[in-house]
Image: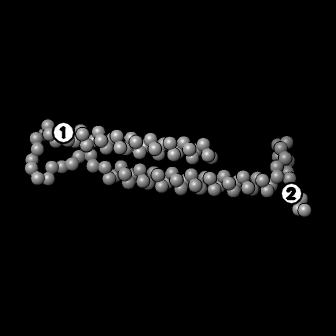
Amino acid sequence: MKKKERYIVCDVVVDLEDAWSVLEEMRRLTGDACDMLECRIEAMLEKMASVELCILPAEEPVTVDEFVAAAETSCTQAAARLTKSVGLFMNCAQIIFVLI
């Protein structure tokens, strides 16, 4: 049977095999967390870029009041959708940080 290499660091016995396996697991978790965050951030930015804040009338002219009312409604709906997405993203980020 192979003897395990052990070292004493700050009065703590360290088994090198265990240390390397823990470091490898941390590397994997960190990589996974970074991948998830990058994908989520990219998706969030794409979603934000595709939101129409104001739909311009194409066929007939509208009054300023009608335009403002339509723009307010559109912006309120977009803000609600983006707020929900940001909340989901933040929950995911918190889970990742707990895992790490």
Q: Is mark 2 on a helix, strand or loop?
A: loop
> x and y percent of residue 53 in the render?
27, 46
Distance from Cα at disc 2 to Cα at disc 1 = 74 Å
Q: Residue at x 48, y 55 (%)?
A: 39
**Residue holding disc 1:** 68
Asked whether, in this view, residue 95 is left or right of residue 27, the answer is: left
Identity of the amino acid at label 2? Lys
The image's colouring method is: one colour
> x and y percent of residue 93 in the render?
52, 45
> x and y percent of residue 78 in the render?
31, 44
Q: Which residue is drawn at 14% across and 53% down?
A: 58
State the image quarter where residue 17 is shown. Answer: bottom right
> x and y percent of residue 21 in the render?
73, 55
Q: Residue at x 27, y 49 (%)?
A: 52
Question: Which numbered circle lies on residue 34?
Answer: none
**Residue holding disc 2:** 4
Residue 95 sits above or below residue 32 on the image: above
Asked whether, in this view, residue 76 is left or right of residue 100, the answer is: left
Q: Residues within 10 Å of mark 1 (few under 14, many from 20)?
A: few
Identity of the amino acid at label 1? Val
Quadrant location of the N terminus in the rendered image: bottom right
